[in-house]
Amino acid sequence: MAKYTELAQDILAHVGGKENVSSVKHCVTRLRFHLKDESKADTDYLQKRDGVVTVVKAGGQYQVVIGNHVPDVYDEVLKVGGLADGGSLDIDEGDEKKGSLFDRFIDVISSLFQPFLGPLAAAGILKGITALLAATGMEATNGIYVVMNTLGDGLFQYLPMILAVTAAKKFKMNTYTALAIAGAMVYPGLAESVAEASKVFGLTLTLPAGGYFNSVLPIILAIFVASKIEQFMRKVTPDVVKMFVVPFVTILITVPLTFFVVGPVANTASSWIGIAFQAVYDFSPIIYGFALGALWQVLVMFGLHWGLVPLAIMDMAQNGSSIILTAAVLPCFTQTGVLAAIWLKTKEPKVKQGAMPALISSIFGVTEPAIYGYTLPMKTPFIVSCLVSGFVGIYLSIFNVTGYAMGGMGIFLYPAYIDPATGSFHSVIHLAIGTVIAIVASFIIMMLLKVPTLYTTVDSPVDGQATPAAPAPEAKTVSASVKDETVKSPVTGQVVALADVEDKVFSSGAMGKGIAVEPAIGEITAPADAEVKILFPTKHAIGLVTEDGTELLIHIGMNTVELEGNHFTAYINQGDKVKAGQKLISFDTEAIRAEGYSLLTPVIVTNSNDYSDIQTTQSKEVTANDNLIEVVK
């Protein structure tokens, strides 16, 4: 829109010019810049500039908060800056600031493995079932065995192909070029051919036993190197031949380089890492088992566990088995035990109602409802779970419990611990004993302790609302008197004060007053009769204007725009009229949290200045359609 041209020009000029922009995207309220040098941006000017709400620096992004009309400003930024659709320039991604080396390592590992964890777990379960069939005496030539073995082993055999896709996305190179490189690495019969002709231009060519099937590190390093070659070739290749010359040169250089340098180095490094972990285990299974078992849930919460997952995969690929993650496979059952005690002892009806579904979920290895809904907020149950997990880890390590596949979670993990070579159930038996210890010990300890009170409210018989047991220091009581408008909660979950939201664009009140909810259920409903003014293309946020003129922004999660619509489903369109309680959006809470995103959902009155007061509920938990906000003129 022409009316935003001046604003767009001013923003570009004061982020250091278009030459300083690596890329720019937008979410529902802000422009998200990746700048080559943030020191060139004039933050003070932009924060004071009319049309800019504020500036936020977070996650390697320079975020200029605009408001609900950000799509129009974004279009103008692309236009006046001559940027390609999506805001990308041909740039050296190495110029971007991405945090510490450790943070970048965790980010890379998460990005590469998270997208296919579900299929990876499914394939592991199938391999476990195949091992179970072999243990019962089924011949390898049996048709059922052949089919099951193929189903389970296919993903692991061609793991480099899958990693090529995720690595290409992470390192920003052409996906199909990456697949061509991976295809060369897992070319059928390559290892046998190399054994017969091991010299290429006088250079010795060596491959790991079995080639690069099942490998992890070689393909990751190969695609990283290829991305740098591709970026360079894009800069120096004339446009008229760029389409085929860039992939041609990238493949021609990367594949031989991988065979002669990258692959051997990666395999050597993988061996050393495995030896190091084995050395710690051999030195003291007790120390190794307790530390990994006790800390695993904490590592998962912060996303730090991704440093170990690929090591286990590499260990299994090289040795056919692994003990690296064994001490960490049973914390889900310690959550089961403490939840059972909580369910029996709690006097809070809402806790008793929600603890049982979370308990059932934990049995199947999905612990997010248990951890984030109950044990972590209560603190004591979470500590009990971690400590018991540590001692269970000691037990598993002492008895050398070994995994033979990256199997499922919870009760689905047992088949992966059957030795496919001998049919031995040694590890399965001790895993089952460890499971019993995990559940019983955590249950007994929690039964002996006081179950903390999760909510500061007691249930009221009127409309299921809660009456405050003690006034919250930062919240105003919602009066029973008639207000200009009552905004209902669009989602079920725990209430969080807006000031406690990590994103200061919301917590500062820059977007308006309101409150946040940590969703227990992945569904957003209309908080009032309203019109859908904004439905963001990625479906992670929606703007409504009620019939009484209240402007509302419901923003599902933090930085969930980066999911690009994955795991979200919208049931309405922009411009629709909706009724209070009508389903607007659903989202997969487990999948989104598994990708490392917070689902904390701010509900903001964006025209707060039109009202003399905005009052929010004091309840610590709400159900969809409970009273959430009162606006007073």
Image (cartoon, rainbow, N blue to C red):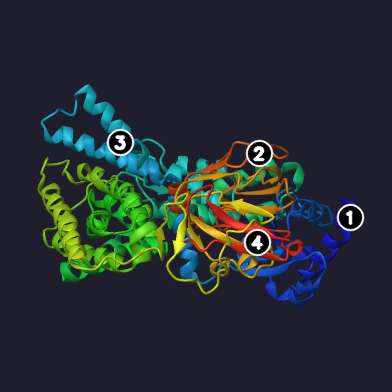
Q: In the drawing, what numbered circle is on residue 354? A: none
Which residue position is annotated with label 2? 578
Which residue position is annotated with label 1? 3
Could you tell me which residue is drawn at 55 percent across and 51 percent down? 489
Marked residue nearer the N-terminal end (2 or 4): 4
From the image, state whether disc 1 or disc 3 is nearer to you. Answer: 1
* Location of residue 338 in the rendering, given as x and y in whole percent from the top left corner: 24, 59
Assess disc 2: are there few (<14), some (14-19) or many (≥20) residues with their C-alpha within 10 Å of its C-alpha: many
Amino acid type of disc 4? Asp
Assess disc 3: are there few (<14), some (14-19) or many (≥20) residues with their C-alpha within 10 Å of its C-alpha: many
Marked residue nearer the N-terminal end (3 or 4): 4
Amino acid type of disc 2? Val
Name the element at disc 4.
loop
Which residue position is annotated with label 4? 92
Amino acid type of disc 1? Lys
Which residue position is annotated with label 3? 152
Marked residue nearer the N-terminal end (1 or 3): 1
Marked residue nearer the N-terminal end (3 or 2): 3
Cα distance, mark 2 to mark 4? 46 Å
